[in-house]
């Protein structure tokens, strides 16, 4: 949001009538009330917005739409990791193992946060690392996109490129990961329910909750099926 610069009457040497006319015109030229998006950007400053949560909760899909609303760049950490490594994430897991992947993931996310502000979608395990959580807390506002077990399973079954689900019991793996990860995801600044509703509805909830969190404004009450919370 730009600030209005009042005319320098002393420098212009205008008459009193000219000054009065100028002031009348300037009143009409004052900016309109700020939008939620502008309020969020102003409060963010150089910080980014980081989406965390399990695979399949929609971090990339919601992140792209949220970035478009805020006119910020969108970055997918997994895509950046693949570009840096020159291979896909399944290939990294297969060739080097999960520990090697997590080390690279930590470095890439640190770099992306240094390049903010952006809207950043992270992989499901990224927020589990304390070093990454600390960086996110220092340089971003974090949003946990939270989805129920059944919603996640319906979504991840559509894709075969999830290394952690290449097991004899993918459903059991999701249950175990949820049990391990949800208490850590709960440390995020904000929580938004990811569910089977239009994507733009989830994005709108992100906007409302971000504005309330950053600007201290009370959001309008949401319907019971809207599970948005500010930590």
Image: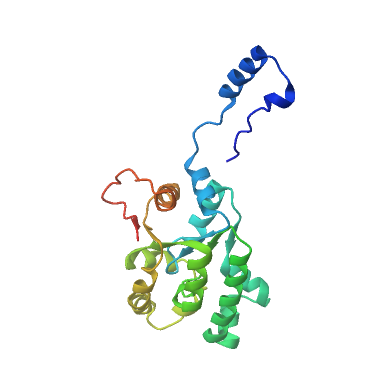
Which residue extends farthest left? 224
Q: Quadrant of the C terminus?
A: bottom left
Q: Which residue appears at 63% of the width and 30% of the height?
A: 6
Q: Nearer the viewer, residue 201 or 159?
A: 201
| As drawn, 71 above or below 29 | below
Residue 122 shows up from this direction: no
Q: Which residue appears at 59% of the width and 25% of the height?
A: 29
Number of numbered discs visible in the structure rendering: 0
Residue 79 shows up from this direction: yes
| As drawn, 93 above or below 36 | below
| As drawn, 46 above or below 177 | above
Q: Quadrant of the N terminus?
A: top right
Which residue extends farthest right? 12
Query: How far across and down, in percent of the image, does residue 117 sit?
Result: 59, 57
Instruction: Give left or right: position of 71 versus 159.
Output: right
Query: How far across and down, in percent of the image, does residue 70 sit?
Result: 54, 48
Query: How far across and down, in percent of the image, does residue 120 sit?
Result: 54, 62
Instruction: Give left or right: position of 44 versus 10.
Output: left
Q: Which residue appears at 42% of the width and 69% of the height?
A: 54
Q: Which residue appears at 57% of the width and 68% of the height?
A: 77
Instruction: Give left or right: position of 116 versus 62.
Output: right
Q: Nearer the viewer, residue 161 or 44?
A: 44
Query: How far across and down, in percent of the image, does residue 103 sit?
Result: 57, 82
Which residue extends farthest front? 10
């Amino acid at each position: 949001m730009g600030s209005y610069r009042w005319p320098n009457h002393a420098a212009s040497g205008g008459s009193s009538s000219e000054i009065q006319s100028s002031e009348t015109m300037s009143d009409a030229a004052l900016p309109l009330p700020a939008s939620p998006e502008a309020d969020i950007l102003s409060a963010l400053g150089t910080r980014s917005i980081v989406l965390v949560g399990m695979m399949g909760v929609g971090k990339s899909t919601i992140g792209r739409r949220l970035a478009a609303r805020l006119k910020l760049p969108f970055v997918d950490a997994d895509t950046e990791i693949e570009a840096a490594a020159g291979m896909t994430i399944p290939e990294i897991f297969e060739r080097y193992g999960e520990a090697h992947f997590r080390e690279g993931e930590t470095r890439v996310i640190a770099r992306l946060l240094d390049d903010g502000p952006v809207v950043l979608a992270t992989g499901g395990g990224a927020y589990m690392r304390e070093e990454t959580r600390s960086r996110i807390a220092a340089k971003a506002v974090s949003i946990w996109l939270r989805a129920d077990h059944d919603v996640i399973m319906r979504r991840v079954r559509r894709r075969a490129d999830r290394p952690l689900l290449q097991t004899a019991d993918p459903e059991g793996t999701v249950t175990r990961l949820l049990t391990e990860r949800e208490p850590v995801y709960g440390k995020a600044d904000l929580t938004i329910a990811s569910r089977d509703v239009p994507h733009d509805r989830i994005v709108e909830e992100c906007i409302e909750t971000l504005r309330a969190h950053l600007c201290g404004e009370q959001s309008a009450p949401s319907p019971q099926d809207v599970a948005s919370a500010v930590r």
